[in-house]
Amino acid sequence: MKKPGALVPLALLLLLQSGDLVNAGTEDICRLFSNGTVIRDPDSCSQSITCIDHVSHYATCSGSTPFFDKDSAKCVKSLSSSTSSCSISCQGVATHFLADPKSCSGYYYCSDQETALHGTCPQDTHFNSTTQTCTRLNESACTTSSFEYCSIVKDKVSFDNLQGCNKYHECEKGVLKDKTCTSKYYQASTGTCVDKALVACDAHPLPTDVCGKASKPKEDTFVGDAATCRGYFYCAKQKDGTPDPNPSWNQCPQDRFFDETNQKCNYPNLVKCSNDRCDGRTPPFVLSSKAGCRDYLVCSDGVTVTTKSCGNYFFDEDLGSCVQDVKTYSVC
């Protein structure tokens, strides 16, 4: 009987191994990518990830095509020399095991000088290239390899940049580039720039001089986020008298808009705001900000579906209908 924690012969593992690797990350990388995007697993040179509804679905390359090529999205016999992070060569090391450069538990067995077969050590063990065995974690010096996005994503595939809701990334000739949506937000699920109200955002870009200028900083003040009717930034007073460089963001509860003039969350129809007025509203029909108080918005899941007019009548938000009586609200 094998003693607990004993080393496992790799030749035996090649015969016994089956199934996919388990992603040890705490956050799924597919939260950044649109549906159907295929990338290389950042933790393995032999696995691909297909993103479906922000969830990673793994597939493993094996046999005579043990490497996953991010550009062709296929399993291949070998990778180009430019893919240095996954460079494996069996020249001169036939019948030897080599470490997977992107995985502590992965390895390749060179069945001859041209063919590498991928394998994975059992759970809670790492591959040790010196002893050519899988060893216990407390005997391993291996740490998870870092990665660059452009080593796992093909050129011209857009993906989310978590630094701002209007930002995203693309790789150009293997170099990561920052991109920005003009007057819109980036939607990871579709990989496109869409209306701001369609994106659940907690990283709103800072408006220009949001906390004032050096000559006149805004101190201990709430400022609208310029993207929603509910959101606001808090500009804290700085010891050196400069504008707060990193104001915190928050938003008013449902059916309340941020009122910058009164520095509080207020009833929506008392707040002038030209952003999507369906955001955070529970009524299916809400007043438009258009002058005259005759127009209203049709809302669905906090987003404006369409705008309608009462013609010569006025819109009564309490009744949710057009009425003859003259209606006046601060917003219109």
Image (cartoon, helix red, strand yellow):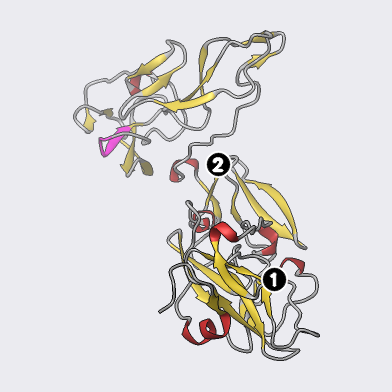
Which element type, helix, strand or loop, lies under badge 2? loop
Q: Give the range drawn in magenta.
A: 282-286
What secondary structure is the magenta-colored segment mainly? loop
Mark 1 = which residue?
A: 130
Q: Where is residue 149 in the image (x, y as percent from the top left)?
A: 66, 57
Give left or right: position of 38 versus 267. right
Q: Residues within 10 Å of mark 2 (few under 14, many from 20)?
A: many
Q: Image quarter for residue 53?
A: bottom left
Residue located 19% across and 30% down the image: 319
Q: In which quarter of the image is residue 285?
A: top left
The residue carrying mark 2 is 165
Q: How packed is label 1: few (under 14 Cα within 10 Å), some, or many (20 or more)? A: few
Q: Is residue 332 visible?
A: no
Q: Check the picture and name the quadrant holding the N terminus.
A: bottom left
Q: Nearer the viewer, residue 311 or 194?
A: 194
Residue type, numbered disc 2: Cys
User: Extreme bottom residue here?
Assistant: 112
